Amino acid sequence: MKLKTIINTALLVGMVGCADLDLNPLSEGSSEAWYSNATEVEMSVNDLFRSVFWQGYEDSWTDDFTNREALTPITNATINGEWGTLNTLWANTYKVIARSNTLLLNMDKIQGTVPQATIDTYTGNAHFVRAAKYGELVFLFGDVIHSTTILSLEEAFTMGRTDKNTVKEAVYEDFDIAASLLPESYGSSENKLATKGAAYAMKARFALQMGDFAIARDAAKACMDLGVHELYPDYGELFLTGTRNPSEVIFAMPRSRSLNVTWSVRNYLPRNVGGWGGAFAPSWDLLHAYLCTDGLPIDESPLYDPRNPFENRDPRCAATIVPFQSRHLNFTYQPHPDSTEVMNFNTGSYQTNNDTRSVAAFASFNGLLRKKGVDEDWLLNYQAENDEILMRYADVLLMYAEAKIELGEIDGSVHEAMNSVRARAYGVAVEQVTEYPAITSSDQAELRTILRTERRMEFGFEGVRYSDIIRWEIAEKVLNRDVYGMLDVAELKEKVIDQDLWFFPMTPEIDEDGVADLSPMFEAGLVKRLAIRQFEAPKQYLWPIPSKEILINSNLEQNPGY
């Protein structure tokens, strides 16, 4: 019992209830003196949407990302129950679930004192949060502790895991309740509470993760039928700081410098502007995934030139990754080792090029820099206030298409959804089929490949890839391929540049999942292996339960392999 009293677990600080310092019994969640009026309830609802509770999946867990020679516990197969990220996610998720439960169980206190529409909005948001957060737990951990009540201390320390299928049905029910109660929008307000569309969209995402394609189809279609959301016309502009609250964004966490809510971006920025040289960079795997402008992968298209890898590519390539010799943040970006000087457009003169490794050893190890969302206001203090987009309409369209493809229901609506996303990338209307490579295939296997590639091109550096490779069960393939970059400068000049093989010395093969095989370049001695990725299957398709939770609760069983 002494151990139970000194360890501050997620279930203790979260599911037992709020942390208000009053004299109410702990088992009552400290709610006796709270939720007594609309203001207190509104504050509690807003608290559910603090950014700490909505940390998206990391790109660094995937094959879209490189951090020089570094890996993560997921990409080097060292994930365990003591990983800090895992423990923080578990604790914060159960904390916000507990607050949702407490809110719902006290909603009767304001009945009759505020309009029913307001109560519905509060209630709908609490159901939405509980659904989204339990859905995340099920996706990551499988069977989890499930409760919709306020737990006593003893209950919190003795509950076992509930079968994920039971939790799944509760998640669907919560999403349905939320969709029935939430408004379609909040007008011109920037308050990022949940909406009806968010409930449908997040339900569709969870259903795809669970392989429930009919549920995903119907939820995505319900969001589409609202007629509230539409694709923003300019793909690159969509992610910039100045693009606030476009109708494409369905659910997001707002950021603001004035409120000191920002994120650190120096690792993404070029060294010429004071950044850390693309320490966090797009991977070569991601660059090779973009189709050519004829709609074909690079190993099939006659338009692809490995010496000029950004030419004739889907526009989302250059919108996500900085093309060589292009103007970026008022400098020419060129990682070629012979380009020891580049144009500084601020001064109108050439200066030392710190973005090539022949000048700066820690310039981008693979020559790539992120462009998506990068804006000049990032340079103010290397902090950014771009909203963190957690769900947007393009995802809804592609989820609808994917669900229909997997169900074998391939019809015009599938092509319409996928082509709408692709046409927007080309800056044209979906009907202008001669202006972009429209998707016309009706073959299920072929469409599955196209869909998976489309998602990767559309959502690069948006935290979506991890969910996709786990639910498609291709993580064991893509995360057991090594990370590659450029040779060291002297060897690079000898083997690549002097042989007229810059930038890529050969074209890799692309498989049925849109994944490039870069190993032949390494075996030929023309690129450098930066890191050896590892992913242990089937073990890593689920995360381990935090070790301290297993330690203090004998009724909790660990996931296999941990």
Image (cartoon, rainbow, N blue to C red):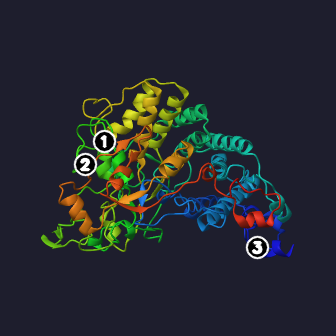
> Residue tagged by mark 3?
7
- For badge 3, the amino acid type reads Ile
Q: Residues within 10 Å of mark 1 (few under 14, many from 20)?
A: many
- Between 304 and 319, the one nearer to me in the picture: 304
Tell me the quadrant of the picture where the N terminus can be found: bottom right
Distance of label 3 from label 1 (alpha carbons): 54 Å
In the rendered view, tell whether residue 452 sits above or below residue 461: above
The kind of residue on which mark 2 rests is Pro
Quadrant of the image occupied by residue 5: bottom right
Along the line of sight, the residue nearer the viewer: 477 or 141: 477
Q: Residue visible at 46% across and 37% down?
A: 397
Instruction: Locate residue 10, reporting x and y percent.
Output: 71, 65
Res. 373 image quadrant: bottom left
Task: Mark 3: give few (<14), some (14-19) or many (20+) Cα within 10 Å.
Answer: few
Which label lies toward us, 3 or 1?
A: 1
> Residue at coordinates 26% horizontally, 66% vertically from top-left?
491
- Where is mark 2, residue-wise? 306
Q: Residues within 10 Å of mark 2 (few under 14, many from 20)?
A: some
Q: Quadrant of the C terminus?
A: bottom right
**Quarter holding residue 239:** bottom left
- On screen, residue 28 versus residue 374, left or right, reads right
In this rendering, position of residue 247 left or right of residue 209: left
Q: Is residue 213 left or right of residue 163?
A: left
**CB contact under 8 Å: marks 1 and 2:** yes
Tag in front: 2 or 3: 2
Q: Is 436 or 235 nearer to us in this picture?
A: 436
Q: Which residue is mark 1?
A: 298
Q: Are marks 3 and 1 in contact (CB under 8 Å)?
A: no
Question: Sequence-wise, which precedes: disc 1 or disc 2?
Answer: 1
Q: Secondary structure at mark 3?
A: loop
Disc 1 marks a residue whose amino acid type is Ile
Estimate the x, y position of residue 60 in percent, counting from the top left: 47, 60
